[in-house]
Image (tube, rainbow, N blue to C red):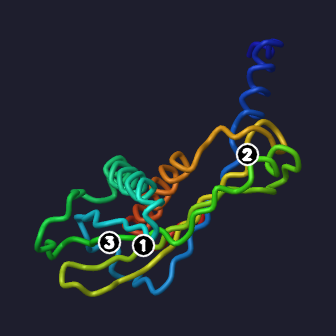
Amino acid sequence: MKPLRKIDALLLVSAFMLAGCTGTTVKPSLTRLDVAKTYSTVVVGDIVAPDELWHNYAIEIHRALADQLVISKAFSQVLDPAPVPIPSNAVLVSGRIAEVDKGNAAARWIVGFGAGRAHITAEFQLVDGAGTQIGTYSVRKTYAGGAGIGGASFLDLDDLATKLGEASADSLADWAKTGKFAKQ
């Protein structure tokens, strides 16, 4: 094995320092775990934003959720847009943005250690083809800045919304495969 060259070490350290500090929290509630593996199809429903200013984030979350569900291969079919009626072998996932906070860039830069953290939280519900709610879960995605302890922002809220959509899809895929939501 070749020893690590100085330039390789410098690139590795730089990549670590410039990587944004993001976090994900998944909280399942009221979810029937016993039915997870019975759905071969997932239908991506509406993601709504109670504030018109958050509408673009809802679009980003929806797009990332659908794309990541296809990539996960946890379901044989991913239907988007939602057909009417919903197939009997399908689970419909829909959601709403509960909270958006862009944080404080100055606090992230000067203080670091999570001060001024930006975050987005969305709540999702799972409904079967008969319209019966089979579960709910929420996903919170946070961003504490990059470039070391605090530092410059490398992600904006659109990026954070995309990451939230991907994390919510990953959680749903885990549920479909194992019957449990992975708490990330």
Q: Mark 3 points at which residue?
A: 37
Q: Residue furthest left?
A: 85
Type of amino acid at the residue the image marks with label 2 = Gly
Sort mark 3 into few (<14), some (14-19) or many (20+) by Cα contacts within 10 Å: some
Disc 3 is placed on an element classified as helix
Kindly check if marks 1 and 3 are in contact, taking CB atoms under 8 A apart as contact: no
Mark 1 or mark 2, earlier in chain: 1
State whether residue 16 is above or below residue 34.
above
- In the image, residue 3 lies at what x, y percent? 80, 14
Residue at position x 57%, y 63% in the image: 100
- Could you give the CA–CA distance between mark 1 and mark 3, rounded to whole angstroms? 18 Å
Disc 1 is placed on an element classified as strand
Is 154 displayed left or right of 85 in the figure?
Answer: right
Q: Name the residue under label 2.
A: 145
Quadrant into which the C terminus falls = bottom right
Q: Nearer the viewer, mark 1 or mark 3?
A: 1
- In the image, residue 132 lies at what x, y percent? 27, 87
- Could you give the CA–CA distance between mark 2 and mark 3, rounded to whole angstroms? 38 Å
State whether residue 181 is above or below residue 103.
below
Type of amino acid at the residue the image marks with label 1 = Phe
